[in-house]
Amino acid sequence: MTTQVENRPPMKDTPFVPIEKIVALCKRRGFVYPNSEIYGGVAGIYDFGPLGVELRNNIRRYWWWTMVQMHDNVVGIEGAIITHPRVWEASGHVENFVDRLVDCKKCKRRFRIDHLPPENVASNTCPECGGELTEPRTFNLLMETYLGVVEGDRMKTYLRGEACQNIYLDYDNVLKSSRMQIPFGICQIGKAFRNEVTPGNFLFRQREFEQWDLQFFVHPSQMQQWFDYWKEKRFEWYKGLINHKDRLHLRAHGSDELAHYAKQAFDIEYQTILGWQEWEGIHWRQDWDLSRHSQYSGHDLSYTDPETKERYIPWIVETSGGVDRTFLNVLLDAYEEEPDPNGKEPRTVLRLHPSIAPVKVAVLPLQKNKEELVTTAKGIHKTLQRLMVSQYDDVANIGRRYRRQDEIGTPYCVTIDFQTLDDQTVTVRERDRMTQVRVAINELPMYLLERVSWQ
Ligand code: GAP
């Protein structure tokens, strides 16, 4: 991501941030709350607070802007969470969407077999206490639900286990109702549900989460070219979002990890205290999805080339990532406790990219008991809030107010002081370098917009 003024300082090689610090900050400052907390909570389900919803919306909007708005050959849809149950038979989820689990007979911990170190699988021992493990049991991850009210006449279906299925279901409608021709893509952002048996690590593995998908439909002869194109694009997109560029890499799936239809797959991985973990998958889905849905629905989803009249099932490049994992990773990437040169409390700062920061600007009168300062500050806040998320704050001394904004990642603080009353300029303080410049009030909106919007 670039802004017109892209001069963020490189981030120092800070240690990995413990997840607990992010959990605490998120709760304290209103980013994320445990769901149903007053009832004791539900593992793997979270709610987003006032700042969290702003950050999420910004992340989503930036993805949509890059993927849909900026590509003439990509359109978007928004599909329903519940679909016909046959969808999940055709997709293979009813049969194959399973985790195999073992329990330790001694310490009672539960593990997914595919997460166990190979030596523990071989010796059938617990990686924590060395105890003996039980025989593996298989669990389907799909969440069931029922449609209809009359007992005995209710239809069992599922909350979608992956959001992308709607894209295959709507593919033919999009083709007929838009002017798209192959090669073209369909995007969607939407919730997905999985009965994860080991939810954990905060937003990393949840039971209700949100995915963003591109399904790009191509002629088989162009598959490799488009696969490479999207792999590169998506990698660069994530790189533009973070400070620690060296903590991002692409990992090719080994032959034992590949889905049966895939010739290749890559994970974009990010390194945190949890190690290298998947952030987004780039998948070679070939003709699997449209063939299966043609077969299960009886509706022919093949494509006829308008010029050559060749008829074929399009192949698909999928890029599938998580909104929640992005939310967590950008916080882990941005969080820093900077030692204070005067030995005071360290400065906690979220070095979020200005374009996704939940609050773009804070407007601060130097003193709250000086009416002219307050009136001017409120006027500036009113002007700015039409253009971006602006916060007015006159509580506590200016240093504390700066700290409050640093902790939530606000890139700019505007201070209205006595000079403002003389020359109609304000102080603009930048979060990362803490530099201060004077800007004329009438130039302030453009000054800030240039620095907080992506282009
Ligand atoms: N349609 C392909 C698909 O669903 P996936 O690798 O299972 O592939 C794609 O999921 C992305 O969704 C992951 O890279 C991750 O960012 C996110 N994701 C998957 N399971 C998740 C979970 N339980 N909690 C949070 N995010 C998850």
Image (cartoon, grey):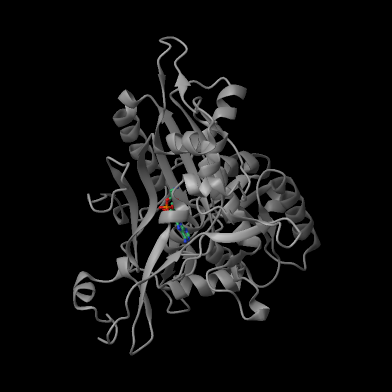
Q: Which residue is drawn at 32% across and 48% down?
A: 259
Q: Position of residue 33 (x, y in %)?
A: 60, 70
Q: Where is residue 89 in the image (x, y as percent from the top left)?
A: 49, 48
Q: Which residue is drawn at 32% across and 80% down?
A: 134
Q: Is residue 119 placed above or below 333 in the rendered structure?
A: below
Q: Nearer the viewer, residue 191 or 421?
A: 191
- Which quarter of the rendered image does ligand 1 occupy? bottom left
Identify which residue, 231 or 395, lies in the foreground: 231
User: Which quadrant: the N terminus?
Assistant: top left
Toward which corner of the image does residue 121 lie, by quadrant?
A: bottom left
Indicate left or right for 426 with 18 as reference.
Answer: right
> In the image, residue 236 lies at what x, y percent?
36, 42
Q: Where is residue 35 in the image (x, y as percent from the top left)?
A: 62, 71
| Res. 386 visible in picture | yes
Task: Farthest residue to the front: give it.
Answer: 152
* Residue shown at 57% from the left, 34% from the top: 170
Position of residue 270 relative to residue 118, above or below, is above
Residue at the extreme bottom: 106
Above/below status of 375 relative to 240: below
Residue closer to the observer: 351 or 367: 351
| Rendered residue at 43%/30% (across/down) | 217
User: Is residue 358 in sight in this rendering?
Assistant: no
Which of 91/54 is in front? 91
